[in-house]
Image (spheres, rainbow, N blue to C red):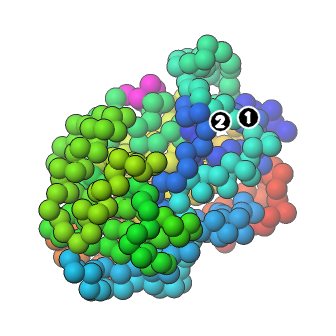
Amino acid sequence: MSGRRVLVAGASIAGPALAHWLRRRGAEVTVVERAPGLRPGGQAVDARGVAKEVIRLMGLDAAVRAARTETAGAHHVDADGNVLETFSAEDDGGDGYIADIEILRGDLSQVLYDDTRDGVEYLFGDRIAELAQDADGVDVTFASGSRRRFDLVIGADGLHSALRAMVFGPRERFVRHLGMVLAFYSVPNEFGIDRWLLDYQHEGRSAGLRPLKDDTRAMAMLSFPADGFDVDHRDIEAQKNLLRERMAGLGWRTAEILAHLDDTPDFYLDQVAQVVMDRWSHGRVGLIGDAAFCSSPMSGGGTGLALVGAYLLAGELAAAGWDPEAGFAAYETLMRPYVEANQEIGRLHVQSRDGAELDMEAVMPLVERAINGVELPDYAGVPDSGSSVGSAAR
């Protein structure tokens, strides 16, 4: 064991995934999460291409597949419910519009937490209040009042990363609004949703319903164009009022979906945005996942970026002998082309919702880079307490 002490902020997907790999590489890992526990539910997220290989290398393929939504595919429908277009989860070898591995964000978070909870320290209901770094480490003061010193601190705390704002600057410097707002929440399955997602789009707005493993519930998905977004991301009532206002009169089954706004247990609404940064590290503090390179939900690649980023960041830090400058630099070099491809996909999807015609022949090479556009080093000379899982050698 190296004894390197690493603090990770955020316990959604990127944080626990990074904790898995840091621990396997010999670090002592603490994860701090401001919420009192894991957040259940959430949007369906996908793993495609190289991200599926990372899941296999983690030894979690069976657990992740057992928690899938098992969505068979998607139907695009008109206002009367007539099917206009169909996509199957079997398309493109499971890496198509509906991925073979599709799982609710909260369910994937639970799988990753269960995998790491015995070997990683989790601090729920707390957060980083202050930090100060020097050449040898980072002194952290938690909101609870405790103070500790770590060798490295990694922010995996999402689009609205508090650690990023603390170390790198205000969110306005890095967050790029793509002109759309997305909301989702679970509703009683009074709509007859089985294993097929239904999606209705009209003049830039959309309403959809997707199946859940609990067939008595369905997940509602709503989106609308918005050039500006000035509602506090923590003011739920204001968000619900905004959603009602912007979705009024859309048609299809939108009114029925909106009728459940006040009784849903898991409402979420936020801007469709990306995080664009020149670098993802400063001294001994680094960023990963949406905090560093959010590609937006429209890309379908955020989970892959988190999982692949976790593998590469832990591997490159360990390969560099835990030297932050060398480790962070190598991680950024490997990840950036993969990130940029996924961010471009996210921008194109928003443009297509606005009615822009896409040249699919030109787009397909970009899609391939977004799915498989990073090579996983095998880190053969790096410690790995779970090396029996397999090798990522290409």
Q: Residue at x 59, y 33 (%)?
A: 36
Q: Inspect this view and state whether residue 205 appears.
A: yes
Q: Would residue 96 appear left or right of 389 to someone viewing this image?
A: left
Q: Which residue is rendered at x = 26% and y = 73% of the image?
A: 200
> What's under tag 1, amino acid-wise?
Glu
Query: What segment carries the magenta color?
Result: 165-169
Q: Is residue 91 above or below residue 220?
A: below
Classed neighbour count for the residue bearing mark 1: other residues with Cα under 10 Å, few (<14), some (14–19), many (≥20): some
- Measured Cα–Cα span from mark 1 to mark 2: 6 Å
Which residue is identified by label 1?
121
Q: Which residue has dot 2 on it?
A: 31
Q: Secondary structure at mark 2?
A: strand
247 to the left or right of 132: left
- Along the line of sight, which residue is nearer the eye, 369 or 95? 95
Q: Which mark is residue 196?
A: none
Question: Split into 4 quadrants, where in the image is the C terminus?
Answer: bottom right
User: Residue 385 colored magenta?
Assistant: no
Q: Nearer the viewer, residue 134 or 87?
A: 87
| Quadrant into which the N terminus falls | top right
Secondary structure at numbered mark 1: strand
Q: Could you say which quadrant of the image residue 84 lies in?
A: bottom left
The reply to whether discs 1 and 2 touch (Cβ–Cβ < 8 Å) is: yes
What x and y, as percent, mark residue 271? 30, 48
| Residue type for callout 2 | Val
Which residue is rendered at x = 35% and y = 61% of the image? 221
